[in-house]
Structure formats: structure tokens, C-alpha cells
Amino acid sequence: MKKRVKTVLSPYLFLLPCALLILVILIYPVLSGLVNSFYNENLIRPITPVFVGVENYAKLMKDSMFLNALWRSIVWTVVILIFEMAMGLLFAVLLSKDIYCKKLFRCLVLIPWIIPNAIAGIIWKWFLNESFGMMNYLLKSTGLISHNLAWLSDEKMAAVSVVTVIIWKSIPFVAITLLAGIQAIPGDLYEAAKVDGARSSQCFRFITVPMLRNIMLITAILTSIWNFNQLEIIQVVTKGGPGEATLSLPVYIYRLFMQTFQTSYASAAAVVMMMVLIIPCIVYVRKLLKE
């Protein structure tokens, strides 16, 4: 009997350290932030925090800056998702072909993903600088523009620039993930299709895309969560400016915490962001459980 109990409990005992680590690192901060969101704590005012219930959440629903940042983050995530999936799939298909220096190109594709976000932000901030950036220099050298463009000081161009940088950073992960999926597709399917007279475009449409559907869904969910949470690149490149043109929800919450020290209000905003992100997380978990 003791041996049987020991056999049953042993796996759970091995998992216990990991479970405690997850509890301390992940669950405690979430619960702490949730509790804090119901108070009026502000580090600038050295007073004992008072319980205010859902007052912070009610204030958020009337905060135009918060609502605009939330909407901007959602729209950007959708736009980035469309471009990164399309371009990532294109690169994956190209890298799956027998092209010259295929291994070298695979290494080059990974470079944007390898570079840390903060470093990537610094590089792009220099590259897009209006006065001495390489982007304006290259465009003027080729005669495409006659004067320097304000990539980071014009509201519309700054938004486009930030989204472009995030897309550039996301494509490698999508490409490599989909490449692994393409390589897992049995070659017999393509050979049988070609025997039946199928063209390359038809093979791509009726074999490649359907076979990649599951991995594309999981990749889309993961990258959407990561891109929605993107802070470092935006903070380094534009700091949410000019004005509020590139103020995403993570940057807005960062400002509340680190600049105005409204910790309870920032916690409420973070809880709302967490609730938004729970939706794709549920889809992701359900997909994994089905498989």
C-alpha cells in the first residue's frame, strides 16, 4: 500500500518546486496587482491606501487616453498580424526551396529576432533620425525624396515607423515556425498532386496552406500576445509620441507606474489589459487541448 501511494505521489513531488516557482513568480504578482487596483495608492502621496472598490475601473472607462491607447494597441496588433503572417509565410516558402546559400539566408532571417528589443529600438531610432538617419540618406541618394522626412516627429509617419519596426522584429519567428511546418508536410502529397497535373500555385493553395492551418493559428495567437505587450521598442523609438500618436496600452501603463506613480490606477489598467489578452490565451489553450 505504501509503495503504491509513493508511486502515485512521486510525480507530484517532483513537480512541486516548479509549481512553487510559478506561484511566486507569476500568480503572486497578478493577485497583488488585482488587489492593488481596488485601492487609491499613489507613491507621491505618503498616505495609507484606502479601499475604493471599482472606482479606478470606472475612471478608466472615462479616460480618453486609456481608451485611445487600448484601441490603438488592438488595431496595431491586427495590422502587424496580417503583415507578419503574410511575409513570414512568404519567407518560409522561399527558404523551403532549394535556393543558393539557403543556410546563409536562414541565418540572416533570424537576425531581427535575435537582436534584443531595446537594442533594435536604438538601431531603428538612429536609422530613422530626421537629420542624420540612414533612411533619409538612402532615399535622397536614389532620388526618391528631395528633403528629409520626419519619420519619428510626424504623428502618422511615427505610427507607421513603429508598426514597421515591430513587423520587422516579428517576421523571423513566424518564418522559422512555418518553415518547420512546411518541412513536416509529406513530400508524397506534392508528388501525387504534380502527377495529377497540379500547378505550384495549386499545390500551395490546396496542400501547403491547409496543412499549415493549425501551426499558423498557434503562431498567430502567440505573436499577437507578444505584439500587444510590446513596450521596449515603442518606448525607445518614440516614447509614445509625438503627442499620443504611438501611445500603446503598455506604454500608457508604464507612464502611470514610472512617471506619475499612480500604482493603483496603473494596476487597474494592467488588469484590463490582462483580461483582453485572456481571450487569445483561452483560444490557444483550447487548441492545444484538442491536439
Image (cartoon, grey):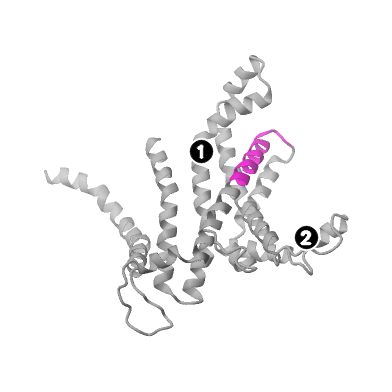
Of residues 277 and 286, which is closer to you in this image?
277
Q: Residue furthest left?
A: 1
Of residues 78 and 106, which is closer to you in this image?
78
Left or right side of 107 for 226:
left
Residue drawn at x 43%, y 63% as measured from the top left: 61
Q: Position of residue 58 (x, y in %)?
A: 39, 65
Q: Residues within 10 Å of mark 1 (few under 14, many from 20)?
A: some
- Identify the residue under disc 1: 215
Q: Secondary structure at mark 1?
A: helix
- The amino acid beneath tag 2 is Met
Q: Nearer the viewer, mark 2 or mark 1?
A: 2
Q: Quadrant of residue 146?
A: bottom right
Span colored in magenta: 82-99
Q: Residue furthest bottom?
A: 46
- Identify the residue under disc 2: 135
For the stretch drawn in magenta, what is the main secondary structure? Answer: helix
Q: Position of residue 222 (x, y in %)?
A: 49, 48
Residue drawn at x 49%, y 36% as measured from the top left: 214
Q: Earlier in the sequence, mark 2 or mark 1?
A: 2
Q: Position of residue 98 (x, y in %)?
A: 70, 33
Left or right side of 264 for 69:
right
Residue drawn at x 56%, y 48% as measured from the top left: 78
Q: Is residue 90 magenta?
A: yes
Left or right side of 239 for 3:
left
Above or below, 139 relative to 176: below
Q: Secondary structure at mark 2?
A: helix
In the picture, the quarter occupied by the C terminus is top left
Between the residue at mark 2 and the residue at mark 1, the CA separation in whole angstroms equals 35 Å
Of residues 59 and 51, which is closer to you in this image?
59
- The amino acid beneath tag 1 is Ile
